[in-house]
Amino acid sequence: MSLRKDRRHASATKPFERLLIANRGEIAVRIIRACRELGIESIAVYSDADADAVHVRAADRAVRIGPAAAAESYLRVDAILAAAAQERAQAIHPGYGFLSEQAALADACSAAGIVFVGPGHETLVSLGNKLAARHRASAAGVPVVPGTFEPLPVGSRADKERIKAEAAGVGFPVLVKASAGGGGRGMRRVDDLAELMDAVASAAREAAAAFGDGSVYLERYVERARHVEVQLLGDSQGTIVALGERDCSTQRRHQKLVEEAPAPGLSETQRRALHDLGVKVARTVGLRNAATAEFLLTPDGEFWFLEVNARLQVEHGVTELVADLDLVHEQLWIAAGVPLSQRAIAAAAAAATPQRHAIEVRLSAEDPAHDFGPTPGVLTAWATPAGPGVRVDAGVEEGSAVSPNYDPLLAKLMVVAEDRPRAIARLRRALDEFVIGGVQTTLPFHRWLVDQRGFAQASDLSTDYVARNWRPVEVVAVAALRATELAAIAIRDRTVTSNEATPSANGHGAPAWWRAGVVEGTENRR
Amino acid sequence: MTDRLRVTIPDLPLTVQPAPADVAGFAHVGRGESVRPLPSTAEDRSEGRTRLEVVVGGWRFEATVESAARAELRDRAARDAAAHHRVADLTLRAQIPGRVVKLWVADGEQVEAGQRLLAIEAMKMENEIRAPHAGTVKEIKVDVGALVERNDELLTVS
């Protein structure tokens, strides 16, 4: 009884009393932090693979929802709703990925009287599906990437001739994309007719496995295009604002590696035009809460609509750093029915004239020397950079196991500075401070990237930059030779012997030779 | 230790044998560099080998260090033994844990170098395994849908 009274009393100071986070990893930790700041009790969910995960310990409470496989845990609407009911959560934040854009979760929430932190059913249905979004945007007069508007006839009703004719109509190279896709999954670039049917089949299979929907369609592949996107926020009173744009052109296999805000080289006029397109798309579907409208920026300077992600985006942090706004706080207040804050409206008004620059790099358990293949394992060392203008959103710590069951993203390193050159200098400094052991990550790729002319001077930002320029063999060879020197020094100085070579997974139990300073990491800097 | 050393990074593969004078000239651990011991196996210990994780600029290597003199003795013994038999078959092992989602070949099938053999899905991405050389597929150890751990045998190309 007293709890209920407290809640009514507290309703002015916090959006909810208890929130369940239907996600894992860095984004779960990110949302839990927002809960802490707002005085909301946080409830984590976890699979068996995550029983000891960072997000579980960060939350006030945690509920097991199933075995390691995502389909049996993080993708189970019933298990998540049961956990929410058991813990009497008033709202569910889905994060990104998993069920974040599934109308099924939003619907189950409204049926159970729980607030879904995200758009309504109608919006999710019309925006969550990329094909439907293409229809909507096109109807609203927003230019879309040329391509098909209906799912390809694949699977049991496969019609090879029609698929080939459609592709020829769009023109090669063509992209096969999953209607329900995201993060590059279920997406294939096809350069000629001979590869088409294989690519369509494997994209449909990957999409069916990842999203439970194997529908795919075709879009023209635009060479040397940039990927820019608009951060949108809408409240339940119908106010929709754009909080600036991000450039996410540095990608490999259609997955983002680096994101920055604002997009370099755009004029104020271009920014306003782009933001207006984003708001226009959002209006056609009555957006509520956070979403991102993605566009291609063609070499001719045209913005072509790609899709809307009706959720918090992985890279939302760079917008937060430039706009000086907490998007998760905003999301939670909006979900509680509170109108957009004056702060958010002021940030939107200033979005076309940004005064700062932020860059994010994704640290993933992937080997950049081997086509960014996954590298699950145990993080035997993990020390993150800090200092002015540096933010790290991580879902792991020293000793964490990186499971092959989930997305390989470990952490996001973000920097903010007065302008882009200073942000890049700060990023280079922060990357040098990152210490990761036990698992190969994308760290060396980012160290390489910051020193590339095309990136550093923003003279060659395009989605195929990595494919055209990343040649890891030589970079690895130089590092490997240096590694042999370091190994030789360590042995010559008897700083490690085979008998004591069993490290503790915990940094506080570092072996004696390490503390002795002979191969100590900061020696040269003193 | 005044012995010459042999440092091996097997994945590359890379082997160097710096003399003590060389090692004396090497710069010590700098920014973005770290050295950590790796768990040793009984074989490492009996062979006098030390395994280290060395990180340079974010690249992670597993290096093995041992006495060069001892390694050379072992090499000679191995060469003598190799003269007696040749290994022609190559057994492919899973480099990542995951699920087999596609098997393009059957037992006894002739394949060309680079031909797709099977696909393993890990972290929701399909990873294609291709034939390392032309030959005959045999001893397929997995089916579509099978869960594999790192180093599990997949099939052999002879």
Image (cartoon, rainbow, N blue to C red):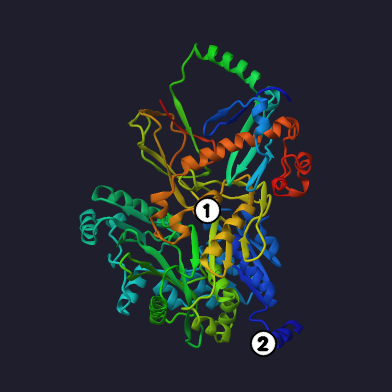
> Disc 2 sits on a residue from what chain?
A
Q: Secondary structure at mark 2?
A: loop
Q: How many marks?
A: 2
- Residue A211, image x and y in percent? 44, 60
- Residue A467, image x and y in percent? 40, 50
Residue A48 visible in the shown view: no
| Above/below status of B29 relative to A94 | above
Which mark sits nearer the N-terminus, 1 or 2? 2
| Above/below status of B81 relative to A467 | above
Label 1: how many residues lie within 10 Å, few (<14), some (14-19) or many (20+)? many
Depth check, mark 1 against mark 2: the one in front is: 1
> Disc 1 sits on a residue from what chain?
A
Residue under label 2, please give it: A12
Task: Kindly identify the residue that appears in the image at 73 percent across and 34 percent down.
Answer: A496
| Above/below status of B123 relative to A92 | above
- Residue A468, image x and y in percent? 38, 50
Residue under label 1, please give it: A446
The amino acid on which the numbered mark 1 sits, given as a three-letter code, is His
Q: Are marks 1 and 2 in contact (CB under 8 Å)?
A: no
Q: Is residue A337 left or right of residue A275?
A: right
Task: Kindly identify the residue that appears in the image at 27 percent across and 59 percent down.
Answer: A153
Residue A310 visible in the shown view: yes
Quarter of the image holding residue B56?
A: top right
The N terminus of chain A - image quarter? bottom right
